[in-house]
Amino acid sequence: MRRCPHCSAFVPATLCPECDHRLAPPSRALARLRNAALGAGTLLTLAACYGAAYQPMP
Ligand SMILES: [Zn+2]
């Protein structure tokens, strides 16, 4: 959640609900970085789950 630089209200997306001030959307590089981090995290979680679930037969 960001704050409007114009009226300092909380802005849920890119358009301020108080004064209709439009905030700049998050940069593409940042979004890509976040997606990459999410993907890596998902892969690690999957690997951890399957690694823990796998039990070799005695
Ligand atoms: Zn505002």
Image: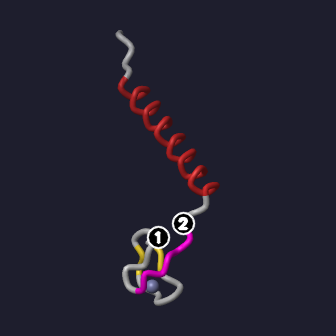
Q: Position of residue 3 (x, y in %)?
A: 47, 80
Dot 1, crowdedness within 10 Å: few (<14), some or many (≥20)? some
Residue 36, compared with residue 57, is above or below; it is below
Residue at 51% across, 88% down: 6
Mark 2 within 8 Å of ligand 1, using the beta carbon: no
Magenta span: predominant SS is loop
Numbered disc 2: secondary structure: loop
Residue at 61% across, 56% down: 28
Residue at 56% across, 71% down: 24
Query: Magenta residues, as a range?
Result: 19-24
**Circle 1 sits on which residue?**
14
Residue 58, compared with residue 31, is above or below; it is above
Mark 1 within 8 Å of ligand 1, using the beta carbon: no
Q: Position of residue 29 (x, y in %)?
A: 64, 55
Badge 1 amino acid? Thr
Q: Position of residue 47 (x, y in %)?
A: 46, 30
Residue 43, compared with residue 28, is above or below; it is above
Return the mark for residue 25. Answer: 2
Along the viewing direction, whichever of 55 and 25 lies nearer the viewer:
25
Return the mark for residue 45. Answer: none
